[in-house]
Amino acid sequence: MICYKIKMKTNFFCIIYIIVFLSSSLFCCCKSTSKPAVGTSKNNGYNQVFPAGRVGTGVVLDNLLTEQEHFDNLSLKYPVILVHGIAMRDRETDSPPWGRIPRVLKENGVEVYFGNTDAWGTIESNAKMLKTTVDKILKETGKKKINIIAHSKGGLDSRCMIWKYNYGSKVASLTTISTPHRGAVIADLILNLKAINTETSEKSLEVLVELYHDIYPDIYTAGYELTTTNIKEFNRIVIMDKRVYYQSIYSVMNNATDDLLFGASYNYIKKELGENDGLVSEYSARWGNNITKVEDGISHGQIIDIMGQEQFGMKILNIYLRIVNDLRHKGF
């Protein structure tokens, strides 16, 4: 098994995750009113750092502070499944955690589906649920493969599904967005805090988790799985499938004011590992041989258009239009 049923040292870990992720779902991701400068980043010796605005291998995305881009036809050979991260839900909701992205992709001829995974499920249980979704879509559409675009922990769920069920023959591509491929130091930090185990906190967590209507919730394990120690073992076991095109895309905040919700966590991660998006470090988000850095001071929540509207002139949708256009040119 990949996902270990390990008892958490502290409920405070889960409380922090709930505060951060629920807040990102419910409140505005605040940015400074000044135009964010195009960021720069030092090369930490773990693959190439792309210049500002470069998306994919050889595909250039202009500065996001431009007019919305339009394409005549972005229809793909295979459907796209959007897989959300932790503390998000795409079932029984009118506001899935992707803002305007699904609508705009559909308007451009892309078949779009949701992963239907749990908000607080483990990597392995979500991988199983995602497998069910893939099977259903392939049966309904008659297509032989699908493309996956996954945010945050959803990228780990997707990697696990491809590996565990040998689905390289059914997945054409996996694009991870701000996924903690090497773990989250925020998880490490909270696990090292003094344990707070009270009956009240446990009951409060149960009530909050119930709001998501998960099928297989396991908030304690789901949180632990994001630690750097656990992900190191995950990466040792869960290897890439040569039949699948993998790419990782991520952003970094320029400073703590880019998104006040993640200001404190940004400063902590900045001190520990350098550039980050407020939750995931640049080091952790960079995975595989096809790596993209989007530089415009974009946070972990903003990169999935979580508020469903433009913020300070940034055209987040351009990222996804270019991703799909790139997949189209690759024959996916």
Image: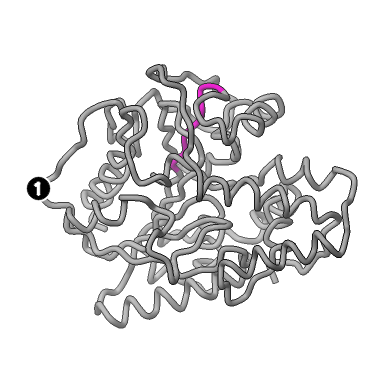
Spot occupied by residue 82 in the image (x, y as percentages of width and height)? 39, 59
Q: Is residue 105 magenta?
A: no
Q: Is residue 40 left or right of residue 81?
A: right
Is 78 or 242 nearer to us in this picture? 78
Is 79 or 202 nearer to us in this picture? 202
Disc 1 designates what residue?
72
In percent of the image, x 34 and y 61: which residue is there? Answer: 147
In this picture, which residue range is highlighted in magenta? 249-255
Image quadrant assignment for residue 315? top left
Q: Is residue 236 left or right of residue 300?
A: right
Spot occupied by residue 176 in the image (x, y as percentages of width and height)? 46, 50
How many marks the image carries: the answer is 1
Image quadrant assignment for residue 139? bottom left
In percent of the image, x 60 and y 39: which residue is there? Answer: 279
In percent of the image, x 18 and y 55: which residue is there? Answer: 107
Q: Amino acid at mark 1?
A: Asp
